[in-house]
Image (cartoon, rainbow, N blue to C red):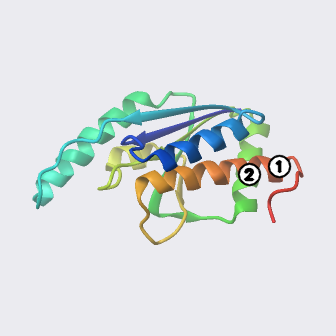
Amino acid sequence: MNIRIIAIGKLKKKYWQDAVKEYAKRLSAYCRLEIIELKESPLRANPSAAEEEAVRQEEGREILRRIRREEYVITLEITGKTMSSTRLAGKIEDLGLEGKADVAFVIGGSLGLSEEVSWRADLKLSFSAMTFPHQMMRVILLEQIYRSFKIIRGETYHK
């Protein structure tokens, strides 16, 4: 399976970079992983609603340029569907069985995703109603993808 993570922003702290490298290394036994970091659009302090929407649109256009036609797209959205780890594993396994070998997970910027990106999603996924730093969310996502493959293969790690 080919997994791509398309994310707005770069990991700035070494500890996040190290965590991503660790999960990327672990995932190499289960899938081909590619992480695409897109530039955050600049936003001045105390922006208007229109300026925030312009940033979402600009970042959204960049995200959509990177999504491939054949990819099954999973966006991370607060209002998305919540799943247990075993349910996410089942979804990933089902995609593979259905011949959908290309999956893109999308993490938006600090203002969220544009409507166009959300519309492109095949699945809108929520990890929580809480808000997490984008750098942390990338690590959490990678951990859950790794956990999913461990569950699919019946390997120890899950509990």
Q: Nearer the viewer, residue 8 or 96?
A: 8
Tell me the amino acid under the disc marked 1.
Ile
The kind of secondary structure element at disc 1 is helix
**Residue 158: horizontal and vertical position, in percent?**
80, 60
Q: Which mark is residue 148?
A: 2
Residue 15 appears left or right of 101? left
**Please, what is the three-letter code of the amino acid marked with disc 2?**
Ser
Number of the label disc, if any, that sits on residue 21: none
Residue that sits furthest to the bottom in the current view: 129
Q: Residues within 10 Å of mark 1 (few under 14, many from 20)?
A: some
The relative height of residue 95 versus residue 159 in the rendered view (above or below) is above
Question: Is residue 141 toward the left or the right of residue 131 in the image?
Answer: right
Q: Compare residues 51 and 41 and report the one nearer the observer.
A: 41
Write the residue at 65% across / 52% down: 143
Can you give x and y, in whole percent of width and height, for residue 37 in the image?
42, 35
Quadrant of the image occupied by residue 11: top left
Q: Where does the C terminus fall, quadrant-wise? A: bottom right
Name the residue rendered at 51%, 49% in the picture.
15
